[in-house]
Image (cartoon, grey):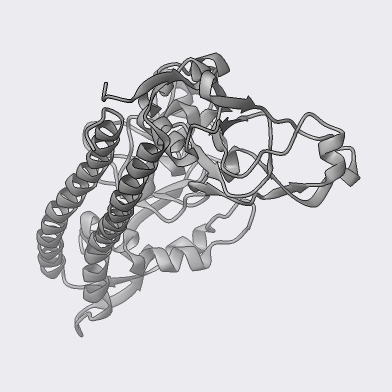
Amino acid sequence: MTAGWETKALGEVCEFRGGGTPSKQRADFWNGSIPWVSPKDMKSVEISDSIDHITESAIKGSATALIPSGSVLMVVRSGILARTVPIGITTRSLTVNQDLKALVPGEHLDPWFLYYALKSCEQGLLGTVTRGATVHRLGSESIKSLRIPLPPLEEQKRIVAILDAAFADIDVAQLNVRTMGTATSEIIDGFVMGLFEGEGSDWARHPLIEVCDYFYDSAHRTPKYSPIGRPALRPRDVVGGQINFERVARVSDAEFQSQCKRYEPTAGDIVYSRELSLGWAAIVPEAHAVCLSQGMCVFGVRKTADATYMTTVLNSSFGRRQALSAAVGTAHPHLNLGDIKAIQIPVPPRDRQEAVMLQIEAVSSQVDRLQRNVDRSSDCLVDLRRSLLHQAFSGQL
């Protein structure tokens, strides 16, 4: 421990305050001017407003109370505690609900130093979370007993100034990395769009149904799912154009046969989502016998078309833009079968389709390398944050 530094439990240096929910039956308690913060408002470091607001009457008539500016807020009850502990600092007086705790620092503790101290302990706090089926809890005693280094106040302010400057630079770097990540995903799509929109004179456009040998809708029933069994593909299982067999729903042999009364998908067929997460196509692989749950259809392409080429067209902005514009329904968006069959497909000669796919695969390979570099850069910035926090609270800054 650095000379002049103490170690204190948070319960010794902070006042802990909880919150509450004013009665929803009292109209005079709501739509006032006082922020009432809940976990859904904890999306930034500085907390000054909220979605919901209450009145002075609500404070007088409920368990909630004003929390002063310069307090540190922590989410202590939420499903999000499975992976992170949202922490913020108030920049005005406000109130909170019962899913948050407010730590009001004493006179010898800088609020921002407390904030950074808690961020440095986030992994340790996650280890004390009590996990429920959907809601997880962080106990007050675990927080109060958490010990932090406590240098003199001026030293705290010096450390905060260093961390503020360093984290501002890291924020800019992370924004740049995110921008690069978005750019890499747009490179391949832009390349594909350029191919399809700049198609040659021999690229005849056809409605999808004209390049299919067969086209089948799913059974008009939701099967009874089982913990084990054969895959039953739902729209959510083909998002992004790949079948996610790790999370796919499964059905018994009897349910499988019921779902396949119209048609049993075979390897090389294209499955397509027509509701909710709609407009995604994927090829059925050799290794899996699958059936369709509701909201899916399946088709097989003619010999004049390549299945990989077809799914690339359908999953590109060129294809998805047509699907999304044809979708109907706001609460339950879906595609009618006629609209799917009418999607326009640029169809060059078969040998040209294969050449196009080789071009796309070459660009995709380069984009994948770029994305791996972006991911490594992102990981390095996360590690840098942790390293700086460790240095700050072990007296190395």
Image point (24%, 33%), residue name? 391
Question: Please, is residue 135 above or below residue 384 in the view?
Answer: above
Residue 200 in the image, given as x and y percentages of width and height = 19, 82
Name the residue: 34% across, 44% down: 158
Residue 4 picture location, percent across and down: 32, 25
Residue 391 in view (yes/no): yes
- Horizontal and vertical percent position of residue 299: 36, 51
Looking at the image, which is closer to me, 157 or 350?
157
For the residue pair 386 and 4, the one nearer the viewer reads as 4
How many numbered markers are drawn? Answer: 0
Viewed as shown, does residue 177 lie left or right of 22?
Answer: left
Q: Going 55% across and 30% down the picture, which residue do you hit? A: 106
Q: Quadrant of the C terminus?
A: top left
Q: Is residue 331 left or right of residue 86?
A: right
* Extreme-bottom residue of the structure: 201
Residue 271 visible in rendering: no
Q: Nearer the viewer, residue 295 or 154?
A: 154
Q: Quadrant of the N terminus?
A: top left
Residue 139: horizontal and vertical position, in percent? Answer: 55, 17
Query: Which residue is located at x 22 percent, y 63 percent?
Result: 188
Residue 183 in which image quadrant: bottom left
